[in-house]
Amino acid sequence: QSDTEKSAEFRDFFTPTRVKVSKLGQTCLAHLARGITGFAASTVARKKKELEKRLGALLASATGCDLARELPAKIGRARDQLLTFCDFPGEVDPTNNTSERKLRPCVIQRKVTNGYRAMWAAKAEADLRTTVDTARLKGANPFAIVLATVRTILYLAAFQASRRAPEFIHFREYLQAAEKSVKAAIIATARKLVVTLNAMLASGTDYRPAAVV
């Protein structure tokens, strides 16, 4: 860190933190953006229109400064994504602080364990964390959501297996011949599929279709 960075005070809008201790201070812009959520929806909509007009005029202004030309260009490319949080108050944050906090446990785990050795394991955890965090945001039970997702995947996998793999086709036809419903036959096929997958993992072998008599 530079001497300037070490001596600078970073403050939010909490009153006690606004007391100056050093001459150099920086107010957190993220806290400034969060304060917008306290306004009424009509006020936010009106302020958004005013800001968009000013932003349009600013981006259209000519300048001879290279830096001043680069910054409006970046803002112009992301203009339709700058004020999305105004249209969805309380649902979309103006900053990515929430996302950064959600990613922190994953980053810590990666540093402690030195990451995954298999890509499928990393993708599986990413999918699991995404499902759990989405469930929490919607106020749902994460375990129930994960369980429902796994059940859906197994059901679809069993449905496809009962149409393509001779072993599972025969098993499903046998159950339906015994007057089992289509749904019950597919659920039973899903259980048989799980047993087959467990056997494959235990033996470390690929799928070998059983002989159908």
Image (cartoon, rainbow, N blue to C red):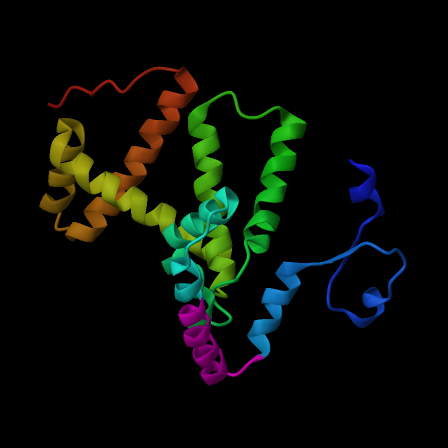
- Image position of 39 (left or right of 25): left
Q: Is residue 189 above or below residue 71?
A: above
Residue drawn at the location 77% of the way across and 69% of the way down: 14
Which residue is more in the foreground, 142 or 27?
A: 27
Q: Which residues are magenta?
A: 39-54
| Residue 179 on image: x %, y % | 12, 51
- Image position of 152 (left or right of 98): left
Q: Is residue 63 among what the camera can see? A: yes
Q: Is residue 36 above or below residue 191?
A: below
The quadrant of the rendering that contains the N terminus is top right
Residue drawn at the location 80% of the way across and 72% of the way down: 15
Residue drawn at the location 39% of the way across and 64% of the way down: 56
Which residue is more in the foreground, 98 or 72?
A: 72
Q: Is residue 95 above or below residue 114?
A: below
**Is residue 88 one of those drawn in magenta?**
no
Q: Residue 114 is drawn in which quadrant?
A: top right
The quadrant of the rendering that contains the C terminus is top left
Q: Residue 16 is drawn in which quadrant?
A: bottom right
